[in-house]
Amino acid sequence: MMNNKFMQAALEQARVGMNEGGIPIGSVLVHNGKIIGEGRNRRIQEGSVIKHGEMDALENAGRQPASIYRESILYTTLSPCPMCTGAILLYGIKKVIIGENVNYLGAEKTLLENGVEINVLQNEDCINLMRTFIENNPTLWNEDIGE
């Protein structure tokens, strides 16, 4: 069981998304120890091409001064794709906590090359949730990652 309350919140968002018929990836944006935006992959639910978990969390945080993003930590249940990585870099988020990168290795190298600190937890709950989803929904998963 996970003891990090922010990754637990991201994982809960992933589970909500799965229960809605979506792809189980969740994310939270944390500033000064408080969640200011939480989100989940809503591509299927909203018919969106950009609503990945990280993008939804940023959207739900609303407009913030640049300083808030620079002081925030993004938690995500799965390694961020190139689109979400671009948003992380654009808004100057300096630290990303990743639930797992076993099922999908996103653009972590790009984050590191741009000075973003990353911590990959390889959390079993995150790994198992994503693995099961991919096995049961390969077409939806491939659409989500642009394959």
Image (tube, grey):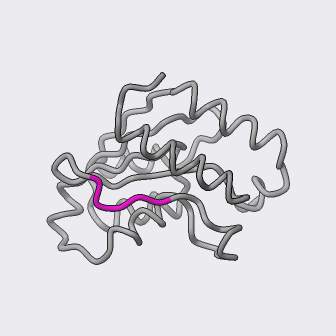
Residue drawn where x is 18% and y is 63% of the image: 68
Magenta stretch contains residue 38 = yes
Q: Nearer the viewer, residue 68 or 107?
A: 68
Residue 81 pos. (x, y %): 55, 54
Q: Main secondary structure of the magenta part?
A: strand
In screen coordinates, is 124 left or right of 121? Answer: right
Q: Residue at x 35, y 45 (%)?
A: 96
Locate the C terminus by quadrant: bottom right
Q: Where is residue 97 drawn, in percent x and y?
A: 38, 40
Using the image as rendered, state which of residue 126 and residue 102 is in the foreground.
126
| Nearer the observer, 90 or 11 | 11
User: With 122 as the anchor, is 93 left or right in this view?
Assistant: left
Marker count (numbered): 0
Q: Nearer the viewer, residue 116 or 71?
A: 71
Q: Is residue 30 magenta?
A: no
Residue 51 horizontal/vertical position (percent): 56, 69
Which residue is situated farthest in the top direction here?
Answer: 1
Image point (30%, 41%), residue name: 117
Give the extent of the magenta segment: 35-39
Residue at position x 65%, y 75% in the image: 46
Location of residue 34 with respect to 122 vertically, above or below = below
